[in-house]
Image: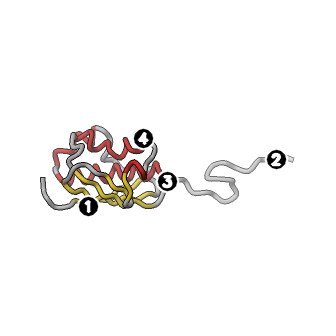
Amino acid sequence: MPAHNTVTVGRRKTAVARVILIPGNGTVTINKRPLEQYFPIATLRQDVLKPFEVTQTTGKYDVHVNVEGGGPTGQAGATSLSIARALIAVTEEHRAPLRAAGLVTRDPRMVERKKYGQRKARKRFQFSKR
């Protein structure tokens, strides 16, 4: 386990998370706030910490996250991807279990743009025959 800090980037929807992974005792800081305060919803906290559970490294690293853009779900997904990438950067052995859990793949789904002459991307204005 190298003593240097590992910096990685993760993206989901329009959220971008930059993660610094430091060997430590497992504290997670997001935008200078503790994890429980930044993500009050339990499922989002689980999403963020899932890479550690899969690789059995819970409590071995301190995480400093700088996340911006998007909403809570996108930010949690971006943070999770970034943590997974950081764990792979620490040791290549983590790649197989993280890949099996689907935590290494960047979710490509983005919001479709609104089209002109329509209410939204696919929803149209009401059609009137007469």
Badge 3 amino acid: Gly
Q: Nearer the viewer, mark 1 or mark 4?
A: 4
Q: Which sits earlier in the primary sequence, circle 3 or circle 2?
A: 3
Query: Residue 54 at what x, y percent from top left?
Result: 26, 39
Q: Is residue 112 above or below residue 52?
A: below
**Left or right of residue 36, residue 123 in this image:** right
Q: Which mark is residue 42?
A: 4
Query: Residue 10 at what x, y percent from top left?
Result: 35, 56
Q: Nearer the viewer, mark 3 or mark 2?
A: 3
Q: Which residue is mark 3?
A: 71
Q: Residue at image x 38%, y 53%?
A: 78
Real-space CA distance between mark 1 and mark 2, rounded to the nearest whole angstrom: 56 Å
Real-space CA distance between mark 3 and mark 2, rounded to the nearest whole angstrom: 37 Å
Q: Is residue 46 above or below residue 72?
A: above
Q: Which sits earlier in the primary sequence, circle 4 or circle 2?
A: 4
Query: Residue 50 at what x, y percent from top left?
Result: 32, 42
Real-space CA distance between mark 3 and mark 1, rounded to the nearest whole angstrom: 22 Å
Q: Which sits earlier in the primary sequence, circle 3 or circle 4?
A: 4
Q: Which residue is mark 1?
A: 7
Please state the total of marks drawn on the protein image: 4
Real-space CA distance between mark 4 and mark 2, rounded to the nearest whole angstrom: 47 Å
For the residue carrying disc 4, how many other residues have a C-alpha within 10 Å: few (<14), some (14-19), or many (20+)? few
For the residue carrying disc 3, how many other residues have a C-alpha within 10 Å: few (<14), some (14-19), or many (20+)? few
Q: Is residue 100 above or below residue 105?
A: above
Badge 2 amino acid: Ser
Q: Which residue is mark 2?
A: 128
Instruction: In the displayed orientation, state which residue is furthest to the right.
Output: 130
Q: Which sits earlier in the primary sequence, circle 1 or circle 4?
A: 1
The residue closer to the viewer here, 46 or 11, is 46
